[in-house]
Amino acid sequence: MKWTDIINLTASMLLSGSPAVASPLQPRSTTFTRRAETTAVNATGGTYEAFKPGYLAGTWEVFKRGEYVDLSGTGYIRVRWEVEYWKGVGPMYEPTFDNIDGTFLFVAGGGGFQISDTPQGCPQGTGCLNFTGANEFGYSYPTDGYNPWHNMYYYLDGSVTITNHEAGGLYNVGVMAYSYDNILSDINTAPADSGNLIKYGYSYDPAEGSCPCAE
């Protein structure tokens, strides 16, 4: 068979709709470790505010500088962030996690965005370049490059104190106990064209990796 015949035969097969051989797909293998949830995580002290309708979602609201919550138990915690730039902009000093007794790990980030992402609709004001401000108010900025997710997830087996250190750039954090299954659902939520579901979450346990994730 001549080369011209081979070329003509190949072209004929393509035009006739013969299926091409597909390259094998590489499945994503990011894992999210399931850890024991044996004792409910509860507040044992603090100066936090209790949740009220209209507040940032959370059981223990740590809204102002110096406010804190003491937690104890064995399970997962969600710390939801809100940069309150419409009330004050400037350097942001993130919350601290102190008095750790036992195991305390950052395990996942979710909620659809990090504060450096561009909103699909400003929380307040217009022309937001990211979630830390708007044209009318200016912008806050982390002092050390900290770039929290809307939902920051932690695992606790013991006790910890979470304290707000805002100064200049104001923010709120809403803290609550959470389950592994609900975290997995959040970090696997697909991005959307509206709202602020901008990207999949990340697993950081046992190692950093983009979701979708599996146990």
Image: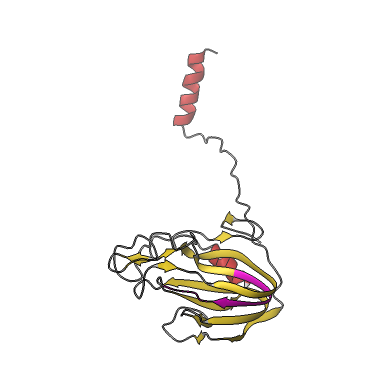
Residue at x 47% of width, y 35% of height: 17
Q: How many circles with numbers are drawn on the protein?
A: 0
Instruction: Give the percent coordinates (x, y) of residue 147.
Output: 48, 61
In the image, taking residue 102 as reference, residue 170 lies left or right, namely: left
In the image, taking residue 160 as reference, residue 199 lies left or right, namely: left
Q: Nearer the viewer, residue 107 or 27?
A: 107
Q: Is residue 162 magenta?
A: yes
Quadrant that contains the C terminus:
bottom right
Residue at x 46% of width, y 26% of height: 12
Residue range corresponding to the magenta coloring: 154-167
Q: Nearer the viewer, residue 94 or 152?
A: 94
Instruction: Give the percent coordinates (x, y) of residue 40.
Output: 66, 81
Instruction: Give the percent coordinates (x, y) of residue 26.
Output: 60, 45
Instruction: Give the percent coordinates (x, y) of residue 186.
Output: 54, 67
Relative to 45, say whether 179 is above or below. above
Q: Nearer the viewer, residue 145 or 34?
A: 145
Quadrant that contains the N terminus:
top right
In the rendered image, the residue lying farthest to the top is: 2
On the image, which quarter does residue 175 sit in?
bottom right
* Dominant secondary structure (helix, strand or loop) of the stretch shown in magenta: strand
On the image, which quarter does residue 126 sit in?
bottom left
In the image, taking residue 129 as reference, residue 43 lies left or right, namely: right
On the image, which quarter does residue 211 sit in?
bottom right
Q: Is residue 191 magenta?
A: no
Residue at x 55% of width, y 81% of height: 68
Colouring: secondary structure
